Amino acid sequence: MSRPHVVVVHWHDLGTHLPAYGVDVAAPHTEALAQQSTLFEQCFSTSPLCSPARGSLWTGRYPHSNGLQGLTHRGWEYDEGERPLSIQLGDAGYRTVLVGLQHEASDPERLGFHEHLSRGSHRAPDVAEEAAAWLDRRAEDDDPFFMVCGMFEVHRDWPAQRYPPEDAGAIEVPPYLPDNKHTREDLAAFHGAIKVADRGLGVILDALARNGLDEDTIVVFTTDHGAPFPRAKSTLYDPGVHVALMIRVPGRLGGAAPRREAGLVSHVDLVPTLLELLEIPVPEDVQGVSMAPTLLDGTPTTRREVFLEKTYHADYDPIRAVRTDSHKYIRSFEPRPWLALPPDLEGSRTRLGMGDAHLAPRPPEEVYDLRADPGETTNLVSEPATAEVLSDLRRRLDSFMTSTDDAVLRGPIAAPPPRRREGSDEETIGVR
């Protein structure tokens, strides 16, 4: 075989809620993959909601640069001329296959995949079955392929008949959520969905192994953004943008020994990484930084900061942020509630037990010392001791936004007319 295959498995709304990231949840297949991979401990999506986060993952460009600043079923699309990874690899001779969910285009044909399987249900068992069957069918074909497996899980809702919940009393509640009956029941259902999605991942990995493809295939596992809970999804706090990322590059392909990488990385870094690993030129407009040296010889990543943004979710909520190893700075461009909950979170069980403090006005600027205050609970924007750090972070964010021509600097950004997407699972997302 002349070139490696690539398989990317991505889930919805997971964040880092896995045993590999210190969470007590049953997910043995993600745990096994973590033990075989480079696991990135500090990977961040560019945005805390679906389409913008995925758009950055597949283009290596920020939402305000590629045009996908809101959800596709609300009218947002890539700008003309954007070339996601599926198109770039197709042009380079790869057979490109989408199995299951995408949320970057109203018409998946615009994404350039040669094949689009599992057009009905995008649930993990069905996606995994379709992917495994395709891998079984092409067992003797040596042409390189790029397979993307998009699973609806672990997006809300989590009906018990589909996702048997865990024991609510045994759940460890994350520190950013209130510990009460409502939250525990919500988390117990969330854990049930994770178990189902994890089994789907296992089916795909087993199919690679039984077809003798595992030593010739780069495997990427990630998610779009943070977990579907208040103060996570739809916010720029760490629970909203801190995401799982595991990349397995087999030793036969020159991969380094499995390890944990503690340095900062961003989802925009995946495209240049894969292109470099596959020896395909990286387009000049890609804004990410390749992680290939980390995967091939264990070189630590060198990012000094990651940039984060949100423009539209259910409504207009323009916020931008810069995060370093030690601090985060968030700037809001419109008066908004401290937490603007999207509909799926507003209707969640957790919301029932959290009161209304989150409806207080959001400050226009926030700065947090992440080492002393990892929960981002104490805004230090008015503290004299933080003045120098604040000035530096303001400068970094201003420079980034100016150099990448972020339109929010010129005033409010208009929303496109909404459109409805086809398919039952995608319509479920569409009302969120």
Image (tube, helix red, strand yellow):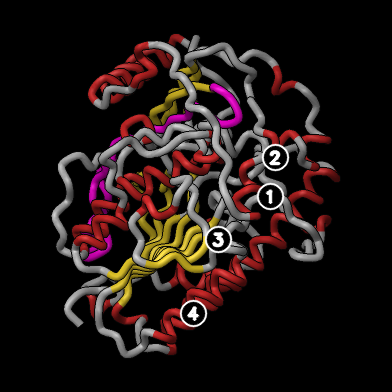
Q: Is residue 280 left or right of residue 219?
A: left
Mark 4 surroundings within 10 Å by alpha-carbon count, few (fewer than 14), some (14 through 19), many (20 or more): some
Question: How far apart in space, not on screen, are marks 4 and 3 (Cα)?
Answer: 14 Å
Q: State the residue in front, 338 or 348.
A: 348
Q: Amino acid at mark 3?
A: Met
Tag 1 residue: 156
SS category of the residue bearing label 4: helix
Specify the segment rendered in magenta.
288-316
Tell me, for residue 344, which label it has, or none.
2
Q: Are marks 4 and 3 in contact (CB under 8 Å)?
A: no
Q: Secondary structure at mark 3?
A: loop
Instruction: Compare residues 242 and 135 and report the one nearer the observer.
Output: 135
Q: Is residue 222 above or below residue 314?
A: below
Residue at 15% from the left image edge and 42% from the top image edge: 284
Q: Whole-percent x and y of residue 375?
A: 58, 34
Q: CA distance from mark 2 to mark 3?
A: 18 Å
Q: Which residue is mark 4?
A: 132
Left or right: residue 50 versus residue 185 is left
* Vertical comparison of 306 with 102: above or below: above
Task: Depth check: give the residue in front, 231 or 380.
Answer: 231
Query: Which secondary structure lies at badge 1?
Result: loop
Which of marks 3 and 2 precedes in the sequence? 3
Task: Report, in whole angstroms, how far the alpha carbon at label 3 lies from the one at label 1.
Answer: 12 Å
Q: Quick one: label 4 or label 3, which is nearer the N terminus?
A: 4
Residue 299 among magenta residues: yes
Among numbered discs 1 and 2, the one appearing first in the sequence: 1
